[in-house]
Amino acid sequence: MKNEGIEGTERFQSPGKGSGLRAVRQFAVGELVFACPAYSYVLTVNERGAHCEHCFTRKEDLFKCGKCKQAYYCNVDCQRGDWPVHKVECVAMCAYGENWCPSETVRLVARILMKQRVTTERTPSERLLLLSEFESHLDKMDSEKDEMNQTDIAALHHFYSRYIRDLPSEQALTELFAQVNCNGFTIEDEELSHLGSALFPDVALMNHSCSPNVIVTYKGTEAEVRAVKEINPGEEIFNSYIDLLYPTEDRKERLLDSYFFTCQCTECTTKSKDKAKMEIRKLNSPPEPEEIRSMVRYAKNVIEDELLEMCELSLEKMGAIFADTNVYMLHMMYQAMGVCLYMQDWDGAMSYGEKIVQPYSVHYPAYSLNVASMYLKLGRLYLGLEKKSQGVKALKKALAIMEVAHGKDHHYVAEVKREIEEQK
């Protein structure tokens, strides 16, 4: 297809950031800026049987591929639509059986390679940015990232070389894996559970801001970009690459580690939310700065090591200094809530959710999916515990955010509306 662009926007050179996306007309809050079909995508293995491999629809009574018995589809049309990319994986899964275990990134790259072999023109996912234009940042990768890249390349050869002829050179694969790691997206459901991985080239064109004016949500395997602030003609369109809960220095570290740049957005310059995010308990003897830094290091270590069984102990220790609204306390409470849900301790999960949701509303930007997700979890917990009025109230708060972030016609919005109606 020809380069027809995206109506209402244009690609431009953003000062200090390289290529970016700019509005050429006004966009209202909640308005769809553009939609982008996935260039390539893959359903995560854990969701097989619950979602269609081709369209990601969540439904019961999916039927499985007759050969590999592992991929599930809505109907024959979805199976046929997926066959061009599934056929290689299907044969490989049958050959390796229980030993078939490539990472999600390896599976995605294999699908990209298959698509590239049959694609000669610009795709509908590349109206403004070609996949070949993706930054790889190979020159900025440390030895650990390079080693991970080489491990993925070895896995691609091991699981796919017999089924994808003439794989690209080591250098070309190194660059492709780096491009995917830097520009790939995680497709999530309404509760922000991981469904799969994908490439959306035009979405990747947007630069990052810790105070974004758009949000990316998913309808099946299509990304939708909606305004969460009023955007005027001439303004750059910014997405967020990371979880925005954390204070400035933490966000900067994450961005530098994963995307190789130092953020200079207004939020990072003013640090306007840092004081609230790092709130300290009102004590007779305020802690020394080094004591606070030490507690932050402790919190990060516990978070990174995913020691969920230490949640209560960690909360007690951090709570001696940090207020309950401190973002590291909130992160640990979120982990504890997840443990309670896993153990089916519904009252415990509800208790943590109630402590989390209000600070989330303060710390995250307007129309945050993280806030909507927490209200959604809480609403469903309340209903399950026969707290009808509280459940409906929480679901309505989730719905108000989702109607802007997902759009009023999204099936996730319809599901929540149905849950509310059922309580009347």
Image: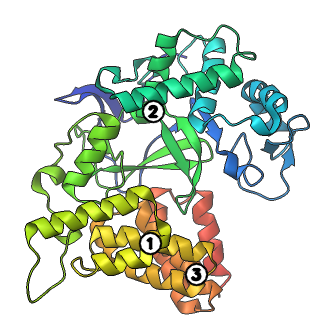
The answer to which image quadrant residue 189 occupies is bottom right
Q: Nearer the viewer, mark 3 or mark 2?
A: 2
The Cα–Cα distance between marks 2 and 1, rounded to whole angstroms, is 31 Å
The answer to which image quadrant residue 132 occupies is top left
Which residue in the protein does label 1 denote?
310
Which residue in the protein does label 3 denote?
381
Residue depicted at x 35% and y 21%: 138
Relative side of 379 to 366, left or right: right
Please name the amino acid that badge 3 sits on.
Leu
The Cα–Cα distance between marks 3 and 2, rounded to whole angstroms, is 35 Å
Question: At numbered mark 2, what does the secondary structure look like: helix, strand or loop?
Answer: helix
Q: Residues within 10 Å of mark 3 (few under 14, many from 20)?
A: many
Residue 177's place in the image compared with 198, above or below, is above
Which residue in the protein does label 2 denote?
181
Give coordinates of residue 289: x percent, y percent.
Answer: 9, 67
The mark nearer the N terminus, 3 or 2, is 2
Please name the amino acid that badge 1 sits on.
Met
The mark nearer the N terminus, 1 or 3, is 1
Way the structure is coloured: rainbow
